[in-house]
Amino acid sequence: MPFQVSLGAMIPIWWKNLILANRDIGTIHITTECYRLYPVEWNIDKSADMLTIFCLNYQLLPRQV
């Protein structure tokens, strides 16, 4: 993958207990098409899964990670 997806792109500002994945992450219009590739979507989805598991195991909100 020629770029990295920031964890902050998956955590919205206004909600405390929400993790975004796939095409819902926060990006600018220039990079939106790059994030719509299937392998990138799958990696974002897997990262959201792992973040959810981590938060549940350690009793943390996504923002606290």
Image (cartoon, grey):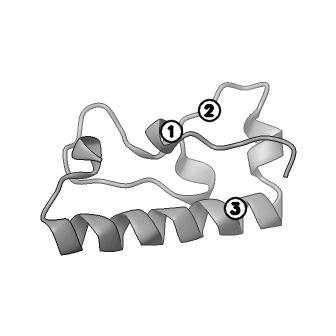
Mark 2, residues whose alpha carbon is within 10 Å: few (<14), some, or many (≥20)? Answer: some
Identify residue for label 3: 41
Q: Are marks 1 and 3 in contact (CB under 8 Å)?
A: no
Structural distance between the alpha carbons of marks 3 and 2: 13 Å
Q: Are marks 2 and 1 in contact (CB under 8 Å)?
A: yes
Identify residue for label 2: 27
Residue reaching furthest to the left: 59
Q: Secondary structure at mark 3?
A: helix
Q: Secondary structure at mark 2?
A: loop
Marked residue nearer the N-terminal end (1 or 3): 1
Mark 3, residues whose alpha carbon is within 10 Å: few (<14), some, or many (≥20)? Answer: some
Report the mark closest to the observer, 2 or 1.
1
In the image, residue 41 lies at what x, y percent? 70, 61
- Residue at 45% in and 53% down: 20
Locate residue 47 relative to residue 11 in the image: left or right: right
- Residue at 45% in and 37% down: 8
Locate residue 11 relative to residue 6 in the image: left or right: left
Q: Quadrant of residue 52?
A: bottom left
In the image, residue 15 lies at what x, y percent? 23, 42
Structural distance between the alpha carbons of marks 1 and 3: 13 Å
Residue reaching furthest to the right: 2
Identify residue for label 1: 9
Marked residue nearer the N-terminal end (3 or 2): 2
In the image, residue 24 lies at what x, y percent? 54, 49
Q: Quadrant of residue 42?
A: bottom right
Marked residue nearer the N-terminal end (2 or 1): 1
Residue reaching furthest to the front: 58
Structural distance between the alpha carbons of marks 2 and 1: 7 Å
Q: Secondary structure at mark 1?
A: helix
Residue type marked 1: Ala
Residue type marked 3: Glu
